[in-house]
Image (spheres, rainbow, N blue to C red):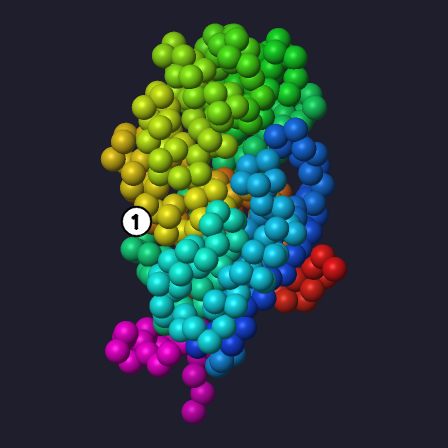
Amino acid sequence: MTIDADVRTAPLSAQDRPPLVIRRADAIPVALPLKKPMKMAGVNITHAQNILVRVEAKDGMVGWGEAASAPTMTGDTLGGLVSAVRDHLAPLLTGADAWEHAALGRRMKAALVGNSGAHSAVEMALLDLASRAANTALIDLVGGAVRPGVAPMWLLGNKTTEDDIAEAHEREAAGFHFFKLKVGVKPLAAEIEGTLALRAALGPDVPLCADANCGFTLDAARRYLDGTRAADLLFLEQPLEPADLDGFTTLARGAPVPLGVDEGIHSCADIEAHARAGAGGVSLKLIKLGGIGPTLEAAQLCRHLGLKVNVASKIAESSIASAALLHLACAIPASDWGVSLTHFYLAEDLVKRPLPLGDGIVARPTGPGLGVEVNEAAVKRFAVK
């Protein structure tokens, strides 16, 4: 008797599950080539330096996690991520029961403070392993889906406005209908002119926001906001340095559009502080908050505080981390300010079938775990020796 490969057995109930004992947990640093270089927070990026976490159970089942290094956002370097997982977190996993992923997470956070990227990657791998073993989608372990997919945002950050407009039209043809413009890097007059020109090229109905990545002074931010009123921006993200909460408060009082916060958000306390300072919304990243669980908690807090939410990956993560972010984005109450899935910026992915964009939507994978199949040959090829 044969069984159709697409037919899966029903998920095991909790009482029927034998222990899911972890045999090993590996930290694998990778360097993934971008389709084109990007400048983020003053750093020119040609390759995404990420860590993969591969957790293997005694029965041979494997779970995967991923986190981007982000020295200027989280303080996590690639070497630091590897050390955090290999030397501090992995030893706590070996021999443990992956069904106890929540308790394991608390134990690991007690053993290693900070290192939010490492904690996120390990949590992702544990949830992937546990949900695969339970024969269910990862999202079902964290509350269930409230939407089937998301419309992704595309980031524009070229040297010239003409190139931004050309890329925007190209991405529109590919199915993207939500854009974020990188600002705070050119002369102010050019930033204002470029924003207005992009709005004119896109038309009035396409959502457009801007991200300064801490690149403005208070005066420059005021002038930019005043000069771009006609662009009808959805929001301006992180105009000032994260530490300048007084300046942020002053800017928010007279801002013609809502202000968003990205680099300034690393905890629920940060969200509350920026809400008091007048923020209109925040960008939630797994690597900043330490994983899916803490980010879900942050999203619930945002709903309570009346803050809009943008859910984003760091530039650039493979379809492993994008799948996790997609599960998250389909589980939170709302993502009014868009979702940034960054595997689209990679020249090559680490899964056999990268998450596709169809009819303007990236659908949530419905298979077990993250719902993507890792290409271990590609992992070996891009591994940093």
Q: Secondary structure at mark 1?
A: loop
Q: What residue is shown with label 1?
A: 146
Residue 149: x percent and y percent?
40, 48
Q: Nearer the viewer, residue 384 or 357?
A: 384
Q: Residue at x 51, y 30 (%)?
A: 179
Q: Is residue 344 above or below residue 195?
A: below
Q: Quadrant of the C terminus?
A: bottom right
Residue 7: x percent and y percent?
40, 75
Q: Which residues are magenta?
A: 1-20
User: Does residue 44 appear left or right of residue 203 in this picture?
Assistant: right
Q: Amino acid at mark 1?
A: Val
Res. 34 visible in picture: yes
Q: Residue at x 46, y 31 (%)?
A: 264
Q: Is residue 297 magenta?
A: no
Q: Residue at x 43, y 51 (%)?
A: 291
Q: Is residue 5 magenta?
A: yes
Res. 138 visible in picture: no
